Image: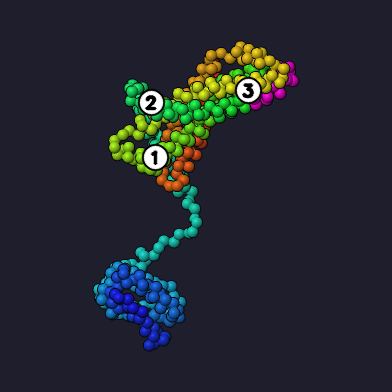
């Protein structure tokens, strides 16, 4: 079998010891066709020792040396090894430069999982990178917000208003629905228990305090995380994949000012309004339930006004401001951390929602402890 640059011939003059004669120019172009032919020749003589006669080789580079070494290393039966009978001195010196032991590929177990120490090390390294990224983001966002406070004219207010409309106005229906159902459920659960003692009127106290101090801001923040936090991560993540953020960096623009500040300001501005709206709708839902327990709506609202004061309202609104800051910050951070790949935006969105909800609950727990010790 021949090639324009090289040839391989099978010599079976001695059937007990066939010879593989290689001649011509042994380079990468010739090997594309010769390699398979050489292996096929060896396969036809599994029980006989095969000699390689390369006296006719006129040129040999590292690709040709790889062929010769591979032929010599072919697994064979006992007494049927491949050996060299003749090679030009230059080719023999080239082949001798390669140690067959060094060319052996490392044995790896298919599907073997990394060791525990390796997993711990990778997790620790990833945690360190994530921590550094969070610290850098918090610092950059703080500086950008401080500059925006000193120079309000530098804020992109059109972006702020657009984000506020999407995160606030467009969220009113779902916030109202959830708040109404929450007020109904709270009132039903409390009335069922208090009815045994004839104290149904105090359901208004429970619903009012629970909504204004705790559940109103908390549920609003969770809905903001699932709706707007995910949107922030998806928008910025898509920009990251499309290299739009790299373009901002290349042109010398501050990506934090352009992408983060407007979203944070909008989220912090709309969440107190959403919380107040949720409180009112939730209280209204509770009043409808109490009407079925022979408590008039006027009596219900009178009891709510008597038990709730401005400190309860401002406590919930203060918490909502922190929740909004966390939701917007985490959404933007996860968007900026988006990697490449088809699933990258989905992973960033999921991470933004989960991280946002976890931070909201943690912050709410801290507020509960602090308010308890401060007597608020």
Residue 203, picture quadrant:
top right
- Residue visible at 63% across and 22% down? 285
Q: Earlier in the sequence, mark 3 or mark 2?
A: 2
User: Within 10 angstroms of label 3, few (less than 14), some, or many (20 or more) residues?
Assistant: many
Disc 3 marks which residue? 285
Q: Which mark is residue 239?
A: 1
Residue 286, picture quadrant:
top right
116 lies left or right of 154: right
The answer to whether residue 273 is above or below residue 45 is: above
Q: Residue furthest bottom?
A: 13
Q: 319 or 174: which is nearer to us?
A: 174
Q: 353 or 15: which is nearer to us?
A: 353
Q: Is residue 288 magenta?
A: no
Answer whether residue 262 is visible to the viewer in this image.
no
Disc 2, SS:
helix
How far across and down, in percent of the image, does residue 52 sit? 34, 79
Image quarter where the C terminus lies is: top right
Disc 3, SS:
helix
Q: CA distance from mark 1 to mark 2?
A: 20 Å
Disc 2 marks which residue? 157
- Residue visible at 50% across and 56% down? 111
* Magenta stretch, residue numbers: 183-200
Q: 235 or 359: which is nearer to us?
A: 235
- Residue visible at 34% across and 40% down? 246
């Amino acid at each position: 079998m021949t090639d324009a640059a090289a040839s391989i011939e099978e010599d079976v003059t001695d059937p007990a010891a066939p010879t593989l004669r290689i001649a011509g120019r042994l380079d990468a172009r010739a090997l594309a066709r010769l390699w398979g032919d050489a292996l096929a020749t060896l396969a036809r003589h599994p029980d006989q020792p095969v000699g390689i006669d390369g006296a006719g080789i006129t040129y040999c580079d590292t690709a040709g040396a790889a062929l010769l070494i591979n032929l010599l290393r072919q697994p064979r039966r006992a007494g049927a090894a491949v050996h060299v009978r003749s090679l030009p001195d230059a080719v023999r010196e080239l082949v001798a430069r390669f140690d067959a032991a060094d060319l052996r590929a490392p044995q790896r177990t298919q599907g073997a999982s990394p060791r525990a120490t390796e997993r711990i090390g990778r997790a620790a390294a990833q945690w360190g990178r994530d921590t550094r990224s969070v610290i850098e983001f918090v610092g950059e966002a703080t500086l950008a917000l401080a500059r925006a406070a000193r120079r309000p004219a530098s804020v992109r207010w059109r972006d702020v208003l657009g984000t506020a409309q999407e995160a606030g106005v467009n969220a009113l229906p779902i916030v109202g629905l959830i708040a109404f159902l929450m007020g109904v459920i709270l009132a039903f659960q409390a009335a069922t228990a208090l009815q045994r003692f004839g104290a149904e009127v105090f359901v208004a106290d429970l619903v009012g305090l629970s909504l204004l101090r705790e559940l109103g801001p908390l549920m609003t923040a969770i809905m903001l995380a699932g709706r707007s936090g995910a949107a922030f991560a998806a928008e910025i993540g898509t920009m990251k994949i499309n290299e739009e953020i790299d373009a901002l960096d290349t042109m010398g623009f501050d990506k934090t000012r352009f992408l983060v500040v407007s979203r944070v300001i909008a989220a912090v501005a709309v969440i107190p309004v959403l919380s107040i709206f949720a409180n009112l709708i939730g209280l209204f839902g509770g009043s409808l339930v109490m009407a079925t327990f022979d408590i008039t709506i006027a009596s219900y609202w009178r009891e709510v006004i008597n038990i709730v004061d401005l400190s309860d309202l401002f406590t919930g609104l203060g918490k909502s401001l922190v929740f909004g800051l966390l939701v917007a910050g985490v959404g933007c951070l996860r968007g900026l951390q988006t990697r490449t790949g088809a699933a990258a935006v989905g992973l960033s969105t999921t991470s933004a929602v989960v991280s946002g909800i976890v931070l909201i609950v943690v912050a709410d727990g801290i507020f509960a402890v602090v308010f308890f010790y401060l007597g608020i």
